[in-house]
């Protein structure tokens, strides 16, 4: 009985050793995967920061372009408005008649 119990105990010990080795390998693999994922995350965070910086810069450029465009539109409105005002004051009530296009005349 003692020999059987001793062999049974040794079998159990080998199984436990195998389980321990398997768990250590799994832990090592998981630690490697965690390290790789951390590197990927760090790279992704770097790209996010770069994209946010680019977005902020582009928003600033967009606002600057919108302001310049608004200034151009305002200047055009003033210029066109003053020219229309000059034409109206020279000939109030009389519209300039156009001669028909040579292609249209028959």
Image (spheres, rainbow, N blue to C red):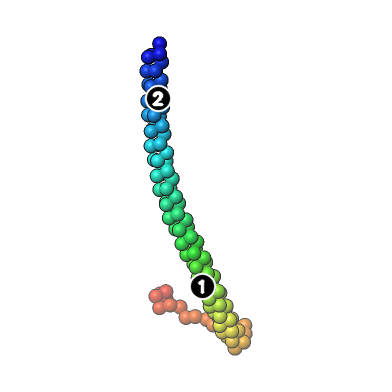
Label 1 near label 2: C-beta < 8 Å? no
Location of residue 71 (image quadrant): bottom right
Label 2 sits on residue:
13
Nearer to me, 24 or 52: 24
Q: Is residue 48 left or right of residue 71?
A: left
Name the residue rendered at 59%, 88% in the picture.
90
Q: Position of residue 79 (x, y in %)?
A: 56, 83
In the picture shown, does residue 63 fall above or below 32?
below
Which quadrant of the rendered structure holds the C terminus? bottom left
Location of residue 93 (image quadrant): bottom right
Nearer to me, 88 or 62: 62
Name the residue rendered at 38%, 33% in the picture.
21
Q: Is residue 21 left or right of residue 83?
A: left
Q: Is residue 66 left or right of residue 103?
A: right
- Which of pointers 2 and 1 indicates the residue nearer the eye? 2
Q: Position of residue 72 (x, y in %)?
A: 53, 78
Residue 88 appears in the figure:
no
Nearer to me, 69 or 62: 62
Q: Position of residue 76 (x, y in %)?
A: 54, 79
Nearer to me, 17 or 106: 17
In the rendered image, the residue lying farthest to the front is 2
Label 1 sits on residue:
65
Tell me how far mark 2 sits from mark 1, CA to CA.
76 Å
Name the residue rendered at 59%, 84% in the picture.
82
| Mark 1 neighbour class, 10 Å CA radius: few under 14, some 14 to 19, many 20 or more | few
Location of residue 43 (image quadrant): bottom left
In the rendered image, the residue lying farthest to the bottom is 90
Q: How many marks?
A: 2
């Amino acid at each position: 009985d003692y020999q059987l119990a001793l062999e049974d105990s040794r079998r159990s010990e080998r199984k436990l050793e195998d389980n321990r080795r398997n768990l250590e390998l799994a832990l090592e693999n998981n630690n490697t995967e965690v390290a790789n994922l951390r590197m990927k995350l760090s790279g992704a965070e770097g790209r996010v920061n770069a994209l946010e910086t680019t977005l902020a810069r582009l928003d600033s450029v967009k606002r600057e372009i919108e302001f310049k465009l608004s200034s151009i539109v305002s200047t055009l409105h003033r210029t066109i408005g003053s020219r229309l005002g000059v034409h109206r004051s020279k000939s109030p009530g009389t519209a300039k008649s156009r001669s028909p296009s040579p292609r249209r005349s028959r």
